[in-house]
Image: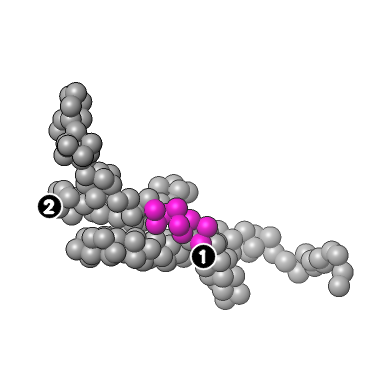
Amino acid sequence: MPDFIEVDYSKMNIKQLINQLDKLDKHAVNQIMPEVMQAVGNELMDEEKRIINSKYPQFSDKLSIMTEHTGKLWRVKAGYSTEVIKSNIEVLITEFGRPGKKTRKKGGKDSKGRTIGVVQPYPHIRAALINKKEQVLKLAEKMLLERIEQEWQKN
C-alpha cells in the first residue's frame, strides 16, 4: 500500500468542485445537521428518562428536545420546556433542589440535625450529559461523516 495519495487534477473543473462543496455545505447546514442533532438529543433524552424514572417517573413524559442553530454553532437542549417549568415548578426543584426557609437563621435544623425545608436535588439532566457526553460526540461525528460521504457520492 502506498504512503501517498495520487489525485489527477487534469480532468477536474475547479469551479464545479467549488460549487459542489458549496451545495454540500448548504445541504449539511439545512438538512444533515438537524438530523444529527435530533439523534444526539434523543440519546440524551433516553439517558435522562432512565435516570429520572427510578425516582420521579411522573416527570419523564415532560422532558423535551430543542435544537438551536446560530451561525455555525449548533446546540441541543434536552430537558424541560418553559411551559412545563411554569406549570410544574417541582421539575426545577427536582433538578436543582430547594434551600430551606430557615437556612440563613441560626437554629435552622430539626432535632435530627437536618436543615428545615431543604429538598435535595436529583440532577438527572446534568447527570445524563456527563454519562453520555463521549458517546453522543462520537455518534454525532459518525453520523455527520456518513451523511456527508453519502451526499458527496450522489454528486
The residue pinned by badge 1 equals 139
Judged from the image, the secondary structure of the residue bearing numbered disc 2 is helix
Location of the C terminus by quadrant is: bottom right
Q: Which mark is residue 87?
A: 2
The answer to which image quadrant residue 56 occupies is bottom left
The answer to which image quadrant residue 46 occupies is bottom left
Q: Is residue 155 visible?
A: no
Q: Is residue 61 magenta?
A: no
Q: How many marks?
A: 2
- Measure how far apart labels 2 and 1 are at the Cα level: 34 Å
Q: Which mark is residue 121?
A: none
Residue lying farthest to the bottom in this orientation: 154
* Front-lying residue, 108 or 88: 108
Location of the N terminus by quadrant is: bottom right
Q: Residue at x 29, y 60 (%)?
A: 52
Judged from the image, the secondary structure of the residue bearing numbered disc 1 is helix
Specify which label sits upstream in the sequence, 2 or 1. Answer: 2
Q: What is the x, y in percent for residue 84?
A: 18, 54
* Front-lying residue, 113 or 22: 113
Q: Is residue 52 visible?
A: yes
Question: Magenta residues: mostly which secondary structure?
Answer: helix
* Front-lying residue, 109 or 11: 109
Q: Is residue 131 magenta?
A: yes
Which residues are drawn in magenta? 127-135
Is residue 67 shown left or right of residue 62? right
Residue lying farthest to the top in this orientation: 106
Q: Amino acid at mark 2?
A: Ser
Are there few (<14), some (14-19), or many (20+) residues within 10 Å of tag 2?
few
Q: Residue at x 81, y 65 (%)?
A: 5
Q: Residue at x 17, y 50 (%)?
A: 90
* Front-lying residue, 89 or 11: 89
